[in-house]
Amino acid sequence: MFPTSSFVLSQPIPLAAAATSAAAVHVTATGALAIHGVAKTVSIPLDARLSSTRIEVAGSITFPWGDFGMEAPSIGGFVRVTDKATMEFDLFLTHS
């Protein structure tokens, strides 16, 4: 089972005028990332672009497992992963 997570912005993300075209704009989202009951203030780099009727946002953040009270998974002691986790996401925002 995956740990629950949430991200709450600490301030709005300003977008440049270029954000109205199909070109990707690079912005940073700063806020509280909570995973597995532990919250940390982080900055996440994002790529956003307007695509016909929606805004597409993609980003990722890499962090040590221990920052959020977790251990790197291990299967039977012979399969191990790195000491850092990466969370990736894609958002598709539409007007309702």
Image (cartoon, rainbow, N blue to C red):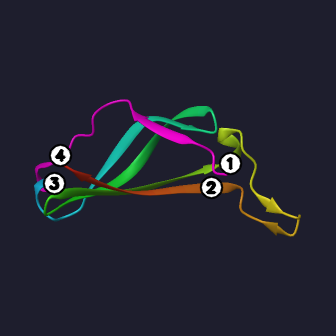
As drawn, is 2 to the left or to the right of 51?
Answer: right
Q: Residue at x 13, y 63 (%)?
A: 52
As drawn, is 45 to the left or to the right of 77?
Answer: left
Q: Please give the count of numbered marks on the rendered protein.
A: 4
What amino acid is labelled 4 in the image?
Answer: Ser
Q: How many angstroms separate mark 4 from mark 1 (CA)?
A: 37 Å
Element type at mark 1: helix
Q: Nearer the viewer, mark 4 or mark 2?
A: 4
Q: Which residues are magenta?
A: 1-18
Tell me the number on the disc at residue 65.
1
Task: Using the rendered view, name the quadrant where residue 4 is placed.
Answer: top right
Tell me the number on the disc at residue 85.
2
Q: Label 4, on which residue?
A: 96
Earlier-in-chain disc, 4 versus 2: 2
Earlier-in-chain disc, 1 versus 3: 3
Q: How many angstroms separate mark 3 from mark 4 (CA)?
A: 20 Å
What amino acid is labelled 1 in the image?
Answer: Trp
Element type at mark 2: strand
* Nearest to the observer: residue 69 or residue 44: 69
Whether residues under marks 1 and 3 lie with C-beta atoms below 8 angstroms apart, the answer is no
